[in-house]
Image (cartoon, rainbow, N blue to C red):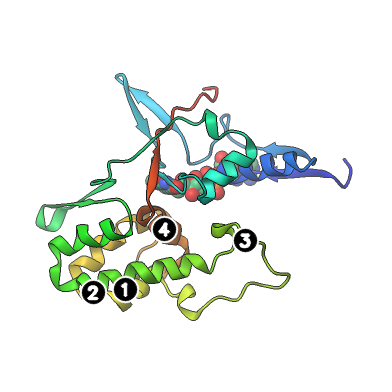
Amino acid sequence: MNNNDIIIIGGGLGGLTTGALLAKEGRKVTILEKNNIVGGGLQNFTRKGILFDTGMHMLGGFRPGQTLYRICQHLGIMQKLKLQRVDSDCMDEIYYASNHTIYRVAEGKAGFVESFATHFPHQRAQLQRYVDAIYELADEIDLFNLRPTGDGIPLHSERFMWSADEFIAHYIDDEQLRDVLAYMNPMYGAYRATRQPMFMPLSAHFTSTEPTALWVAHSNWPRP
Ligand SMILES: Cc1cc2nc3c(=O)[nH]c(=O)nc-3n(C[C@H](O)[C@H](O)[C@H](O)COP(=O)(O)OP(=O)(O)OC[C@H]3O[C@@H](n4cnc5c(N)ncnc54)[C@H](O)[C@@H]3O)c2cc1C
């Protein structure tokens, strides 16, 4: 092993992408994965001929010029991905069991606001401010925007560290809408008591409010 060698622990998307980037820079990379299949949280399986995702099913940032597009282009894998656009009028469907309501979330910033404002017209202005604030938070993250980082520890606004529930409650008055907007938070282990910082689910919100593309996970990775 020499100074150019890198060992990465964990063969999820983070480890694999980091490894690929470093290898492209000429480093000798070894990725150690404890499971017998790589991919981490991104997996799929078939039951009775139907393909299921274990979790990850949708990725944002794949329009030309956007972050993931640029990374995949840089790695030379963009053309190999089987991408399919999400339905522009419904990129997510949320079933709210308490009142048996289905919320269909349209793509894009304006679509996101409109989808919820249809059900909560008195919260239209609040929704707009909420989405704008999410974009502002996302803009604080150099990596999201593929900007070079400074030398020091990045400084963030105070609200960057607010918990997800604090953040939502700051912008949204309606209790039920607060609940609905938190629909992605459980996948990050965020519930009220944990006070999960907003930046954790931010990526999901950021993804969901961007004009996006659905990656149907047709993985060719070897199965155990
Ligand atoms: C239900 C659900 C739905 C999701 N949906 C989406 C979505 O639609 N779109 C989206 O963009 N994101 C989604 N996400 C988030 C996404 O899955 C994660 O952000 C992403 O998979 C994280 O990748 P990672 O490499 O950081 O971690 P992981 O995928 O968790 O990979 C970590 C890897 O490290 C390995 N490992 C851990 N410890 C060790 C060790 N000691 N030695 C060796 N190996 C080790 C693990 O086995 C694993 O393979 C979803 C998450 C969940 C839970």
Q: Do the residues labelled 2 and 1 touch (CB within 8 Å)?
A: yes
Q: Which amino acid does label 2 sit on?
A: Ala
**Disc with the residue nearer the chain's start (3 vs 2):** 2
Q: Is residue 155 above or below residue 198?
A: below
Q: Is residue 11 visible?
A: no
Q: How far apart are marks 3 and 2 (CA)?
A: 31 Å
Q: How far apart are marks 3 and 1 (CA)?
A: 25 Å
Helix, strand, or loop for circle 1? Answer: helix
Residue at coordinates 39% horizontally, 72% vertically from top-left?
133
Residue where numbered disc 3 is placed: 147
Q: Which amino acid does label 4 sit on?
A: Phe
Residue nearer the viewer, 43 or 177 = 177
Circle on res. 125: 2
Q: Distance between the residues labelled 3 and 4?
A: 17 Å
Q: Ligand 1: does it lie within 8 Å of the C-beta at label 1?
A: no
Residue nearer the viewer, 137 or 8 = 137
Residue at coordinates 48% horizontally, 65% vertically from top-left?
138
Image location (x, y in percent) of residue 203: 45, 57
Q: How crowded is mark 3: few (under 14 residues within 10 Å), some or many (20 or more)?
A: few
Q: How crowded is mark 2: few (under 14 residues within 10 Å), some or many (20 or more)?
A: few
Q: How far apart are marks 2 and 1 (CA)?
A: 6 Å
Helix, strand, or loop for circle 3? Answer: loop
Q: Ligand 1: does it lie within 8 Å of the C-beta at label 3?
A: no
Residue where numbered disc 4 is placed: 206
Residue nearer the viewer, 137 or 177 = 137
Q: Distance between the residues labelled 1 and 4?
A: 14 Å
